[in-house]
Amino acid sequence: MKKTLLALLALLAIFLIPVLASAECRVPDSSWIREVCYVSPSKTTANLNGRQYTFCGVPRPVFDAWTTAVSPGRYFNLRVKGRYQCP
């Protein structure tokens, strides 16, 4: 049992660590958007007012514009919210 668990953890580390290492996280200048992370072309995560959300299919230019916008909250409401739900 112990060997099986260790083997499973080793496999998770092999596949999970590169994904986490490649994530780019930014802290936009916003009072309620704490952090936005571009994990992959199919997954973007955001901490909005202390709650974690996952968005799917956010294009890299949208991530860049969102995290550098003069008003990241307004950009989120106009260009992200309701458009990139995960299945």
Image (tube, grey):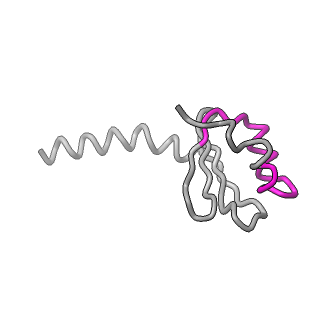
Q: Residue at x 40, y 39 (%)?
A: 14
Q: Residue at x 52, y 31 (%)?
A: 87
Please, which residue is most extreme toward the bottom here? 31
Residue 25 position within the rendered picture, expressed as x and y whole percent measured from the top left: 65, 53
Instruction: Tell me if residue 17 comes above or below residue 32 in the rendering.
Output: above
Instruction: Tell me if residue 10 comes above or below residue 48 in the rendering.
Output: above
Residue 63 position within the rendered picture, expressed as x and y whole percent measured from the top left: 74, 43
- The secondary structure that most of the magenta stretch takes on is helix
Please, which residue is most extreme toward the left here? 1
In-image side of 5 versus 54 (left or right): left
The magenta segment is 55-75
> Can residue 69 be found in the magenta stretch?
yes
In-image side of 14 versus 36 (left or right): left
- Picture quadrant where residue 42 is located: top right
Figure quadrant of the N terminus: top left
- Count numbered badges in the picture: 0
In-image side of 27 versus 55 (left or right): right
- Picture quadrant where residue 81 is located: top right
Residue 53 position within the rendered picture, expressed as x and y whole percent measured from the top left: 57, 50
Residue 35 position within the rendered picture, expressed as x and y whole percent measured from the top left: 65, 58
